[in-house]
Every structure is written in C-alpha cells, then in structure tokens.
Image (spheres, rainbow, N blue to C red):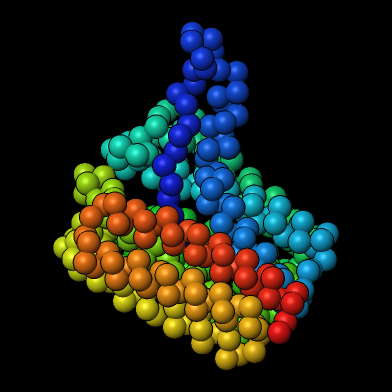
Amino acid sequence: MTNSELISNTTNGEGDGNQPDRFGFVRDFISLTKPTIILMLLITAAGGMFLAAGGVPSLTLMGFVLLAGALAAGGANAINHQMDRDIDEIMGRTRNRPVAGHRISPSKALTFGISLNVLAFAIFLIWVNLLAGVLTLTATLFYVFVYTKWLKRSTPQNIIIGGAAGAIPPMAGWAAVTGSLDLPAVYLFAIIFFWTPPHFWALALLIKKDYADAGVPMLPVVTTVSHTIQQIFYYTLVLVGLTVMFALTRAVGLIYLVSAIVLGLVFIKMAWTLTKNQTNGQAKKVYLYSLLYLALLFAAIMVDSGVQL
C-alpha cells in the first residue's frame, strides 16, 4: 500500500554498556517487516471484514485473515528493504535499517520476505478463500515490482499509483467474508487510494533532502513546496468528499457519516492551514493526523457495522 515508510529505530547489534545484544538479530528481522505499517494495514482489513459481515465477523476467520495479512505485508516490507538498500544507505532516516546497515544480508531479507508471502497465501488458500489470497498476493507484487522497483525511482506520480497496493487490504477483508467483490469494497479501496498522497507527501516534505540526495523523484523534490502543499489540500478535499459519498450507498450508517464529516473537516482545516503556514512543524501535524484520521475512520466503520442507525 504504499501507504507510509517510517523511521527504523533498530539498534546496531549492541545492548547496554559493552554487553552484546542477544536479541538484536531477532529485532532486526522484526524491523524488516515494518510492524507499524502492518498495524495500519490490519486495521483497514478488519474494517472491510466488519463491513462485509454487518457486525463482528467470525473470530476464527478474522484471526486467519489478520495473521495471513500480517505475514504478507511483513514479507512485502522485507523485500522492500532488500530492493531499496542502495538508496536506504544514502538517506539519513533509513541508513540504519537492517539491510542498509549490513546486519542482515540482502539474500536473507529476500528469502525471509518470499517465505512470509508463501505462508500467507497458504493460510488464505486453506482457511479463508482463494479470492482473498489472490488480492493479498497482488498487493505484495504491486508494491514490490510496480512501486518499489519501477515507480518510486522513475516518476513523481509514484505514490499516487503505488498507493494502490496499500488500498487492497480492506478489499481482501471484504472478500474473506463474502467470497466476492462488491461496491462497498471498491469504496474502501478508493478511500485509502486517495488518502495515500496527502499522507505521504506530508511526510515527504519533512524528508525532502533525503529523497533528493538519493535521487528519488518524490513530489517535493521535483516541484516547489507550495505546489506540493496545494496537491495535499486538493487530494484531501477529494478524499473527504469520497468518504461522505460512501454514505449514499447505505452500506454504512449514521455513526460512520458523522465520523467521516467531523474527521474530514479537521483534515481539511489542517491541510488548509498548511497552505498558509508552510513549515515543517505544520507538515508534521498533517502527517501525524493523517495516520490518526485513517485509523479512526475505519474504527468508525467497525462500530457502525455493529450499530446501524
């Protein structure tokens, strides 16, 4: 999904004082999976399941979906570490990642990532259904080959198109419950698809120099800060309009609608403030709020699914 690449706080293999860190190797492999990103993807997948079930889905089914989804996302992220190791070594916020920091070899990261995805697909195939498994595998392949290998390094539109990978989990959650894809699942996909650019561009404003040094053509690198901020504001307007339109399908109820309006108005206000106050401090506020916004919006979907008004 391309939904956000967060700073790795992995240690360099040493513990307190001069004592060797016995668990550093384990932490490095966990760090490869980018757990914070996985958590957000699982929230959206769960939202799709709640919406499809019209309430709390089967806990057993949800357990399998979330486990397999976490494995697939973690595997995709591990492969991303392997493929991006050259630019990760250049950027200050990523040079201490396990592969870039030469604590885990590229071949081990790749093997780890592929193995997690094979296991995830097997879980979907045996205990969920083929469609959910294919959707999840598609998200991995799109993230790895379309976004990481191609778009990220070649076009400032990278995060717009590449964001499709991070928008698939709620569709997979819906498919896990229904065995099909329907209009509400498409809306969930579209919501995350249009959420990704303002979320990621706000982060890109904060680390523009890193991307410039690495030769990655993120929007703030190839155009002005003002233009980037304009695009953040425009995409936020589209996003909020889309979330409100979703209520017209009657797949969601009043709790969702009120939440979408309130959360959306706050997002618009913060993006508008960024157009007037073009500072890193305000960009950081927009970035952090975008994370909270998506989590709360999908939490509202889950609550609404069980308490239709």
Q: Nearer the viewer, residue 171 or 266?
A: 266
Q: Residue at x 39, y 32 (%)?
A: 96
Q: Position of residue 214 (x, y in %)?
A: 25, 45
Q: Position of residue 218 (x, y in %)?
A: 27, 58
Q: Position of residue 23 (x, y in %)?
A: 60, 23
Q: Is residue 213 above or below residue 49?
A: above
Q: Is residue 223 left or right of residue 2?
A: left
Is residue 306 among what the camera can see?
yes
Q: Is residue 53 left or right of residue 213?
A: right
Q: Residue at x 62, y 60 (%)?
A: 43
Q: Is residue 124 above or below residue 24?
A: below
Q: Nearer the viewer, residue 118 or 289?
A: 289
Q: Is residue 52 left or right of residue 161?
A: right
Q: Residue at x 65, y 84 (%)?
A: 253
Q: Is residue 58 left or right of residue 172?
A: right
Q: Is residue 155 above or below residue 308?
A: above
Instruction: Pick out the residue farthest to the top.
Output: 18
Q: Nearer the viewer, residue 264 or 72?
A: 264
> How many marks overall?
0
Screen quadrant of the C terminus: bottom right
Report which quarter residue 228 is drawn in: bottom left
Q: Nearer the viewer, residue 74 or 246?
A: 246
Is residue 182 among what the camera can see?
no
Q: Residue at x 24, y 71 (%)?
A: 230
Q: Position of residue 247 (x, y in %)?
A: 58, 86
